[in-house]
Amino acid sequence: MGLKSIPGHLLPELAEYVHKAGFKLVQIGGRADPQVDAYDGAILHNFLPSQWREIFALGRALIGVDSWTAHFASILDMAADNTLRVHTSTACQYEGVVFRTG
C-alpha cells in the first residue's frame, strides 16, 4: 500500500457510510490495484479525456487521498464543487466516484 492510500481496513467502513447515505461507490485506480469487494464497481484502467468528463459529470462526489481528481477536473474545464479531497503525505492508490442510487 502506498503512502497516499486509504488504509485497507477502512475501505469497508467507508463503503458502508457511503451506502447508508444513499450512494454507490466506484473505485478508481490502476491496473495493478486490487478491487475493493465492498464497493459497487471499479475503474482500474485509463480512459480518453471525454470519457473521464462523463464519469466526473455523473458522479455526485469524489473522495480521494490526492489532488489528482481536482487537477484533472480542472484540465477538463469542469467545476470541482463535487470534490471532497483528503490529502495525505505522498502516491495515491484509491479514489472513489460516488453515485446516487434510485
Image (cartoon, rainbow, N blue to C red):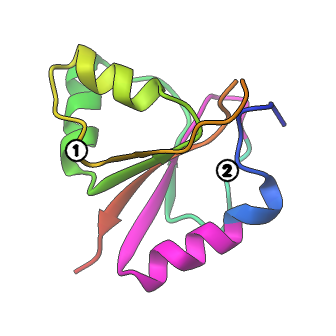
Q: Which mark is residue 73?
A: none
Residue type beneath disc 1: Asp
Q: Nearer the viewer, residue 52 or 85?
A: 85
Q: In the drawing, does residue 26 fall left or right of residue 4? A: left
Q: Is residue 30 magenta?
A: yes
Is 31 within the magenta?
yes
Q: Which residue in the structure is indicated by mark 2?
A: 35
Q: Residue furthest bottom?
A: 20
Label 2 crowd bin: few (<14), some (14–19), many (20+), radius 10 Å:
some
Q: Secondary structure at mark 2?
A: loop
- Hey, which quadrant is residue 15 in on the image? bottom right
- Circles 2, 1 touching at the beta carbon (< 8 Å): no
Q: In the image, what residue occupies the spot 64% across and 29% down?
A: 31
Q: Position of residue 62 (x, y in %)?
A: 39, 48
In the rendered image, residue 47, in percent from the top left (x then y), is placed at: 37, 23
Going by the numbered disc 2, the residue's amino acid type is: Gln
Q: Residues within 10 Å of mark 1 (few under 14, many from 20)?
A: few
